[in-house]
Image: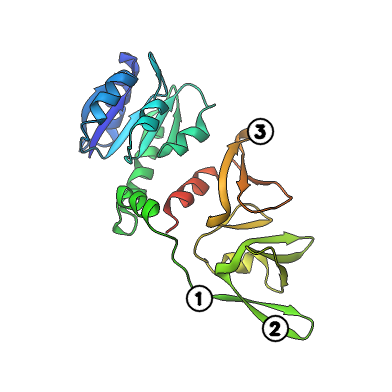
Amino acid sequence: MKVVVIEDEKITADDLIENLLAVRPSYTVVKLLTSVAEACAYFKQQPEIDIIFSDIQLGDGISFDIFKELSIITPIVFCTAYNAYALEAFKANGIDYILKPFSQAEIKKAVEKFELLTYKNGVSINKLLNYLSDKPLKTNNMSLLVYQKDMIIPIDTNDIAIVQLVHGTVKLVLFNGDVYTTAQSLDDIEKLNLPFFFRANRQFLLHRKIIKDAHQYLNRKLLVRLNIPFDEQIFISKEKTPAFLAWLMSAY
């Protein structure tokens, strides 16, 4: 694997490279970049890189400026002394976020996550990101049954935006605003492994299409914003955040 490191502190860069090569001797660090300007000039050449390890605060700016200016789809592990940038890191192709001083175990965990995302189902992460940007979500034909008076109505799961548990009752909130109740439990619906649905917490299953963005909240939780009208706030716990972000990236 070809690796680029973006870090302006030599001691930190040397430590990162040493620990990375200790856990993955087969990896090759092809370039060490020390500034936003140097990184922009380098990536404009479109080098073939598999993964980037990047500090956030550099001498001439923050590394997010690099990824905003250039179209870079290479997965990035951000390494920084500050956790305030976590959400923005994941918006910039970040697959993991390591706080300094980092350990060899943390680097190994980040590498393993990268390899899992890269080789899952034989699809490279770069191909996956390209696919997500170019293709609409696929559909399926599964339905859930709802009961309304003496009628049994099949609801196509492609029409469901949110599955919500309210005081023991499971509600299906559709994209068109209609709401139905179902006799199935939230756990039972989750076990169906429906495409594009994520179990946000004990109350909600969310469809990928309704996710507008997410914001860092108290205690490192994420507050999810939706692109449909919905009165309740939906949170992702810090424990579920990595799985949620991986799901956002891999739902296709």
Is 125 on the left-hand or right-hand side of 248? left
Q: Which residue is mark 2?
A: 152
Q: Which residue is mark 1?
A: 141
Question: Residue at horizontal 73%, vertical 49%?
Answer: 232
Position of residue 60 relative to residue 216, above or below, is: above
Is 135 on the left-hand or right-hand side of 85? left
Is 193 on the left-hand or right-hand side of 223? left
Which amino acid, mark 2?
Ile
Position of residue 99 relative to residue 200, above or below, is: above
As measured in the structure, the alpha-carbon distance from the residue carrying label 1 to the one carrying label 2 is 17 Å
Find residue 12 and report its horizontal and vertical position in percent: 35, 18
Is 45 on the left-hand or right-hand side of 152? left
Question: Residue at horizontal 51%, vertical 28%?
Answer: 85
> Between disc 1 and disc 2, whose residue precedes?
1
**Where does the C terminus fall, quadrant-wise?**
bottom left
As measured in the structure, the alpha-carbon distance from the residue carrying label 2 to the one carrying label 3 is 43 Å
Find residue 19 and report its horizontal and vertical position in percent: 31, 28
Q: Which residue is mark 3?
A: 218
Which amino acid, mark 3?
Leu
